[in-house]
Amino acid sequence: MRVPRSAGFQLTAALSAWLVLLSGPVRSADPALIRIDKRQPVGVPTTLTAQMMPRQELASAWLVEVPGALVARLHALHLSFDILDPAATGRAYYLAFAPESEQVAALASVGQVRLLDDGVGLFWADTEDVREQVPAVISLKRLSDTIRTPVSFVSPARGRARQRALDARIFAPFDARIAEMVDQVSASNLSVLIGDLQSFRTRYASTASCEASGASIHDYFRYQGLETDADSFTFSSNRYTTSNIIATIPGQVSPDRVVIVCAHYDSTSSQATTAAPGADDNASGTAAVMEMARILAGYQFDYTIKFIAFSAEEWGLYGSRHYAQAARQRGERIVGVINLDMIGYADVVPEDLNLFVNDSSDWLGSKFVAAAARYAPLDITKAINASVTGSDHSPFWDQGYSALLGIEDSPLRNPHYHKTTDTIDTLTLDFAAAITKASLAAVAELAQPASVVAPPTGVRVSSHVIRSLFTARRMAVLTWDAAPGAIAGYNIYRALVSHGDYQRVNASLVRQLYYVDRFLPSDTAYYYVVTAVDAQGRESNYSLEAQ
């Protein structure tokens, strides 16, 4: 993977407008691909936004496909945008992350390059088969045809900043079972797993060695007693077939809610088909997922946990793109995705973990930080940056799911990145173990270890505003389905941010299956969970959240 940095695309910035002019004028019959700034001097009418097909969200802009006839209207409104490709029909676009100017020149020799945002470039060629034509050090992301994240803008006339979850406000009761799980993570186990993956010499997708390594991961998951599947797909103009490897712990209370922890198992280098050991990138992340599967297989959880080893990441995130699109199509209800990519190299000690989220996944990053602080203290730097799209969390963002990336450094400082020297002897396994412990704690908290008392299900909330001459107050009416067993009553918890610091609002146990929360401000969002309490005073886990 590659985290964006600004130096690489300075070469193309000055050329972008000139290159677009060479590509020809926008014709009303053709769709155009444009980069449009999120911050606009005027409001963008919803009638125009509805005509924008989103292709990629970045930190400060959107890539959208628009009808050619719409471009003149955008100009007339004095909106800030750039035409990237005036004839966007049927092209395979890639985001490219190139650290050096000569590598950008190598891209330009193969196809078209445009500067986008924070060192991210747009790249396309006459063929979809571009991975084998550009240097291995350049990471690629194949864009989806469309994404589920709605296009939105910030302007003086519209919008306000979303209230973000503060890491310090994400709390959950300490659970001795999670501490027990965390204590089982072994640096020596990670060493064996990374060494085994490295022993395949290369795991470059399209090679027999990659498929053999995938089969070994499949066997490992099966050996842990987990339900395991090989999710096959084709890539690179359907020339090659490979598989994502998926292991599952079914949830006991809400099996339709899914927590995913993932990494990519394929590798690359300048000698990709014969020598790509990929110890850090990304045997380290894959080993962490495998070690978590070994430990968590011995426990039960309220929600389903999926352990996924993705393939063809180095070709353009094809494996995670395939899975995330299919998950959205089948309506999979993913709670959150924790993606680990390069977690073993430490250029300094102590080293910290870098977490990247987008706006809608901020709560997940905060949850991770808080879980690590509780069970596996680790220095963590969290950043909200939608332009960090070079790893397998990004296709989940595209489909509207909450996801985060955990990586050792940003920008990368591993001198062995995408080289034949990326071997296990260059790694700090205690650092990889610390990240694995923190990740396991976060996954276990999200999935909730099964409690003796089952939580209530079917929590619903409706809002009613009561207006007077001078004020408007709101009440929230909660209802839920009875929890099974002998239940003495229920507790209701409320937070100001999703998955945030839940505070109990009822003074005594609620005996009925409804609760009215009164005298709320009319302009504030609230998030609720409900727990069940039995006659012995034992309290269940939280229910699913309702807003």
Image (tube, grey):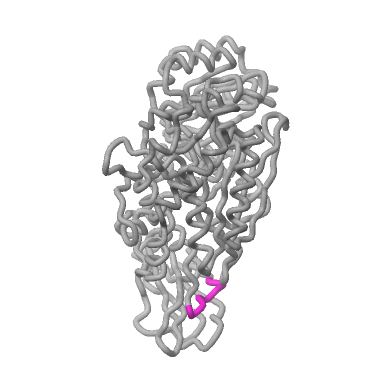
Viewer can see residue 78:
no
> Does 230 sit left or right of 141 as displayed?
right
Residue 402 in the image, given as x and y percentages of width and height? 49, 50
Q: Main secondary structure of the magenta part?
A: loop
Residue 486 in the image, given as x and y percentages of width and height? 52, 89
Please report the bounds of the magenta region as a residue range: 452-459
Residue toward you, 297 or 411? 297
Place residue 100 in its image quadrant. top left
Instruction: Count numbered badges in the picture.
Output: 0
Look at 41% across and 17% down and name the residue there: 10
> Does 200 sit left or right of 478 as displayed?
right
Furthest residue in direction right, as rendered: 238
Residue 473 in the image, given as x and y percentages of width and height? 39, 67
Residue 123 sits above or below residue 538 on the image: above
Residue toward you, 424 or 415? 424
Residue 478 lies in the magenta stretch: no
Look at 37% across and 38% down and name the residue there: 345
Residue 456 lies in the magenta stretch: yes
Look at 58% across and 38% down and name the residue there: 47
Residue 341 sits above or below residue 250 on the image: above
Residue 104 in the image, given as x and y percentages of width and height? 48, 17
Viewer can see residue 275:
yes
Look at 47% across and 80% down and name the residue there: 532
Residue 483 sits above or below residue 46 on the image: below
